[in-house]
């Protein structure tokens, strides 16, 4: 199971929020699988927002929703209906506990990526320090 963090135009985000829409047409550039979670971020004019606008209303605190992928339709399944490289992802809104778990898993994945990057950086620094020490020892003793 993977967590996919994606941006969603506020028009489509609102339709998902109001349960008028139960799918997303997406570029099939990730390894989407049934059972994966999608964390959709509400975007308007290229910026993330934390509200929904409607006729005469503004609903605050709605910036992210979590969904589970229940079905994937690709060009291979429907060559006359979908362009290559695109997929229709059928979605089910993740419930309270399930949504919190998916968001926590996404945060944990980001932390693991950051930790791995820091570990790689430290390993490079350690290798450089070893080389420096070796060079200093060679210059003082003339021996390897």
Image (spheres, rainbow, N blue to C red):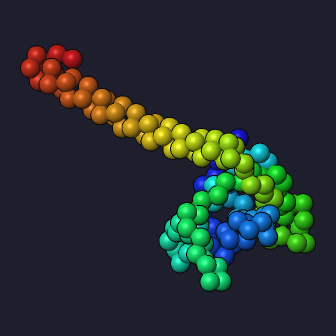
Whole-percent x and y of residue 114?
44, 42
| Residue at horizontal 31 percent and vertical 29 percent from the top | 127
**Lateral position of residue 121 relative to residue 100, left or right:** left
Which residue ends up furthest to the bottom in the rendered image? Answer: 56
100 vs 90, left or right, is left
Q: Is residue 36 above or below residue 121?
A: below
Quadrant in which the N terminus is drawn: top right
Q: Position of residue 24 (x, y in %)?
A: 75, 65
Depth check: give the residue in front, 118 or 104.
104
Residue 69 at x, y = what percent? 77, 52
Q: Is residue 137 left or right of residue 98?
A: left
State the residue in front, 135 or 24. Answer: 24
Residue lying at 71% horizontally and 54% vertically, measured from the top left: 67
Identify the residue at image location x=53%, y=78%: 45
User: Residue 44, how many percent across, how many down?
Assistant: 56, 75
Q: Is residue 33 visible?
A: no
Residue at x 90%, y 60% (from the top left corner): 77
Q: Does residue 132 sit above or below 42 in this rendering?
A: above
Of the 4 image quadrants, the one containing the C terminus is top left
Q: Is residue 18 above or below residue 29?
A: below
Q: Quadrant of residue 133?
A: top left
* Numbered circles on residues, count: 0
């Amino acid at each position: 199971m993977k967590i996919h963090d994606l941006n969603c135009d506020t028009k489509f985000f609102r339709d998902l929020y109001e349960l008028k829409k139960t799918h997303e047409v997406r570029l099939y550039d990730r390894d989407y699988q049934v059972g994966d979670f999608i964390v959709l971020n509400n975007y308007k004019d290229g910026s993330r927002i934390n509200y929904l606008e409607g006729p005469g209303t503004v609903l605050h605190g709605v910036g992210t929703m979590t969904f589970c992928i229940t079905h994937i339709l690709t060009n291979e399944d429907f060559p006359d209906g979908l362009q290559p490289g695109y997929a229709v992802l059928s979605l089910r809104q993740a419930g309270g506990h399930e949504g919190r778990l998916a968001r926590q898993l996404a945060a944990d994945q980001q932390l693991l990526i950051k930790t791995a990057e820091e570990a790689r950086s430290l390993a490079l620094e350690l290798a450089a320090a070893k080389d420096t020490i070796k060079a200093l020892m060679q210059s003082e003793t003339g021996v390897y």
